[in-house]
Amino acid sequence: MKHPISRITASFLCFYMLTGCQPAIETSSAPSPQVTSQAVITTQPELLVDEARLNIYYPVDLTTDLTHLTDNQKEMISLLIEASVIMDDLFWQQAFGEDKNVFLAKLTDPNVKHFAKINYGPWDRLNGDKPFLAGYDAKASGAQFYPSDISKEALLNSSLNDKTGLYSVIERDDNGQLVATPYNQKYSAELQQAASLLRQAAGLAEDPDFSNYLLLRADAFLSNQYQLSDLAWMDVKNNEIDVVIGPIETYEDQLLGARTGFESYVLIKDMAWSQKLAHYAKYLPELQKGLPVAEAYKAQMPGTNADLNAYDVVYYAGHSNAGSKTIAINLPNDEEVQLAKGTRRLQLKNAMRAKFDHILLPIADVLIVPEQRKHITFNAFFSNTMFHEVAHGLGIKNVLNSQYTVREALQEHASALEEGKADILGLYMVEQLLDREAISEGVLEDYYVTFMAGIFRSIRFGASSAHGQANMVRFNYFAEKGAFTRNELGQYAVDMPKMREAVNTLSNLILTLQGDGDYAGVASLVATKGVIGPQLKADLNRLTAANIPVDIHFNQGKEILGLK
């Protein structure tokens, strides 16, 4: 996604992921307090959902083989996990208006407390951010990035200079005036500690490029300038240990889609799988030229210094750990870096496998016709996810004949449309590469049927997920075009010729909306097709009745990994 933007010019404004979903075009100008007086009582607030709802996440131990790593590498992983814990605490502050420890201390039921930790507060991220505890009002669209009583219109019409800054919080001063407080000031103590840990890790890094990246990222925490470290990260090629850390995605900001949430992934490269994937990046310029859209919408060629690798992830923190879990990463979001150097695509193989085994296969057994279930394969799931991330690099980043980026023009709808673009162009890439025999595993039906099952998986993420909303739009578009059929048993079958045509026409539609910066057109698309109809809702309820988890959560940390 991503998500889901230039670090210096605020050009990477945000998008399910495909990672989030967006609010209505306008927000209320009335005050919207998130916590009522009932929430400050010392006993556990009443649970507003059925207790079965607390079990929608399947537990997974987040581990991998560390025996081949050196002592320095293991110590570096420990330091990176410690820095990640700080990112986690910072994201709690950004997402939730009440003190984390005070809030959690009120929750005496361990299942409720566990669910609250997964959601980083009292709002159910996979149920449209509805409160699951009594005493809490609707979650503010802008989370804690803005005063809860500010509307989008009032903010954009204000005299504030830093309305859409990536790395600042909008607050009111003692006189009630809006002011922008940079992250490096707002979270000064925490970021200084995180910077110190990254510098210690840099001293242990065996790869000089990775060491340089860690040092520059540490500097960025203190300077609030992240582009230089993003550029350095693009040059990191040979390190076995990696980390994605800092304020990155804008999905949590559903008021403007502008401000970034803190997160982290600690990663160990799968060298064998990465070597297998490396050759796909070279096809990007050729695929860009062949996009099914007018020439003007594909003239902005992606950087060719992109790479594609597979990793086992050993720690998630902050935004990446909240609610549904990311299984692939495409970064940096900075359009200037993308155009200059491309992006890095990181496939999180162990997390992906957990979702395939425990969620996608059971969904297929319920909702896909028996004769097509043989086409549900992990290879197709892995490849669809991989090419989703690669496809973020295709298309258009800047609105035609305009100074605005697509993210700036589409505002809070940018993330959902970008995730939809990546999904649909990922399928386009698979089709093209199969035709060129660049992909030798499976047939097109494997990828289409697995993708169809994946739509049901992602739609369950709900309206607070950009990935979930993107999948709703796509499901309804495919239904309109006859790309699938549904039998009397409520089982779905892909119509291959119509699916192929729908992939091309939806690709054209999305790329055109992005290139035109057509905010009204995107808003209309989301309003009309970003919804779950009664029949689909009933089918999704069948998955719940079958006790199929909605997503996974992790048992993770140094102890799980056997580290000190």
Image: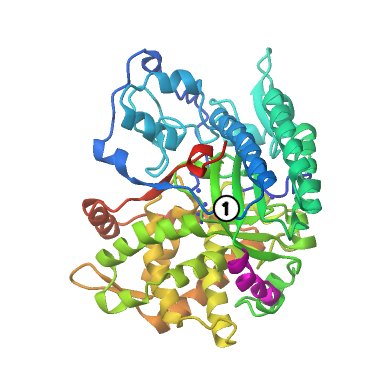
340 lies above or below 104: below
Q: Amino acid at mark 1?
A: Thr
- In the rendered structure, the answer to whether residue 112 lies left or right of residue 26 reads left
Query: By what rule are the colours in the image chosen?
Result: rainbow
Residue 276 in magenta stretch: yes
Badge 1: few (under 14), some or many (20 or more) residues near its Cα, within 10 Å?
few
- The residue indicated by pointer 1 is 67
The percent position of residue 21, horizontal first and vertical second, equals: 48, 48
Q: Between residues 411 and 331, which one lies in front from this camera angle?
A: 331
Q: Between residues 276 and 491, which one lies in front from this camera angle?
A: 276
Q: Which residues are magenta?
A: 271-284
The percent position of residue 317, horizontal first and vertical second, equals: 55, 40
Q: Between residues 388 and 130, which one lies in front from this camera angle?
A: 388
The percent position of residue 60, horizontal first and vertical second, equals: 41, 48
The percent position of residue 184, horizontal first and vertical second, equals: 73, 29
Tell me which corner region of the image, top left, top right, bottom left or bottom right, holds residue 152: top right
321 lies above or below 391: above
Q: Residue at x 51, y 24 (%)?
A: 97
Q: Residue at x 68, y 73 (%)?
A: 284
* Residue 462 visible at all: no
Q: Between residues 41 and 300, which one lies in front from this camera angle?
A: 41
307 lies above or below 93: below
- In the rendered structure, the answer to whether residue 413 lies left or right of residue 288 reads left
* Residue 373 visible at all: yes
Quarter of the picture containing the N terminus is bottom right
Query: Magenta stretch mostly in which secondary structure?
Result: helix
Question: Quick one: SS at disc 1?
Answer: loop
Residue 289 in magenta stretch: no
Tell me which corner region of the image, top left, top right, bottom left or bottom right, holds residue 116: top left
- In the rendered structure, the answer to whether residue 225 lies left or right of residue 99 reads right
Quarter of the picture containing the C terminus is top right
Specify the farthest residue to the left: 488
